[in-house]
Amino acid sequence: MEKLSVCIDDYPSIYFNTKDDVHLFSFKVFNLSEIKEDLRIEFLKIGDTVVKTQKEKDHWGCIHFYFDDHFIGIQILSEIVSDFFSVPINLLSVTGTSGIYGVRRAIDWVMSRQETIAKCSFLSGETNEEDLKYLLDTSRITETLELSMQTSDDFQYSFKYPMQLESIIFFRGSWFSINNLFVTNPRYVWMPETKFTNEEMNLFFRNWLNGGNSNLRTLILSLQNVNIQTVLNGIPSVLRETPNNFLYNGPEMEINHYFSRFFEIRSANGDVASIVTDNGVHKDFLFSFGLTGRENRILWNQLLNKFLFDNHYEIMKSTIKNPVSLQEK
């Protein structure tokens, strides 16, 4: 099924791709004052409204639509495409200074049209804690939640519905508590800003050993100061050497990387976790990734490449359903 993405930023746009992410077409919405002099103006009647349009000269052939109000324009075009192809909005993205249009306005509009939405991305600096609460309370997300919203040191939140997602990506996740981590169960988590302690991560691993966060395959967190002895305190573990390089398979790309050793722990249901440590000089990170067998050895993320070559500190936790020998090719 085709995927419809709606991006509300400084220049709102619509992207329409196939299920394999092959680009079909895209629209961009501008104010009437932004009409380009070097492009031909054409007119399109939408309902009772005549809209000025222009087509880019590049191979993408992006069509520009001009409205008095960015948000009204993106609404009209999104609904036309959604209704014509009988597909829901797959991604709602609000970035840049576009928060002035209102996170709540965007959420209310999408949720009034469909029961759920697969992916939401809110990376706007023009939002506040009440907007964040409203987003988490109201949006019924099924796959991916991506956030970058500034909060105060004492901000807290309790999820009102189960977060059984594929991915959680919080660029500013200092408000996200260890209890939040326990009750959410995504496959992939990336939070480069947290307040988790070594003691809390010890509790997390103990919870995982007893079957908690069973859906988790990839976890990337920053800690103020990682102490592997505290993280593994009271948890049976085995130190293993890994002289061979491994192919890291991630959601976006494949990366070849080397590591020398890791601590292995095993859960009550037979899953295996590998915790890899590497001392760094800037920020301490805890990396978790899943291993599912010989043909798909290690789930990886492209962002990890940057951290590794910046000489950060990493701890990588692997969940292995069918463990294989580290010496196997």
Image: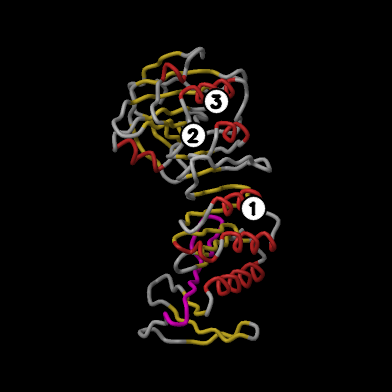
Circle 2: residue type: Leu
Q: Which mark is residue 306?
A: none
Q: Position of residue 217 (x, y in %)?
A: 53, 33
| Marks 1 and 3 in Cβ contact (< 8 Å) | no
Disc 2, SS:
strand
Whole-percent x, y for residue 103 in the image: 57, 59
Residue 51 drawn in magenta:
no
Q: Pointer 1: what residue?
A: 139
Q: Position of residue 291 (x, y in %)?
A: 49, 29
Dot 1 surroundings within 10 Å: few (below 14), some, or many (20 or more)?
A: some
The mark lying in front, picked from 2 and 1, is 1
Q: Residue at x 29, y 37 (%)?
A: 309
Left or right: where 5 falls relative to 56:
right
Residue at image position (50%, 46%) is: 151
Is residue 21 within the magenta segment? yes
- Determine which quarter of the picture holds residue 155: top right
- Locate the N terminus and report the quarter of the image it occupies: bottom right
Name the residue located 60 percent from the left edge and 52 percent from the top edge: 135
- Which SS class for mark 3? helix
Circle 2 is placed at which residue position? 219
The x and y percentages for residue 193 are 43, 39
> Mark 1 or mark 3, which has the lower sequence index?
1
Q: Is residue 15 above or below residue 183?
A: below
What number is the disc on residue 204?
3
Residue interval drawn in magenta: 16-34
Q: What is the C-alpha distance between the residues marked 2 and 1?
A: 23 Å
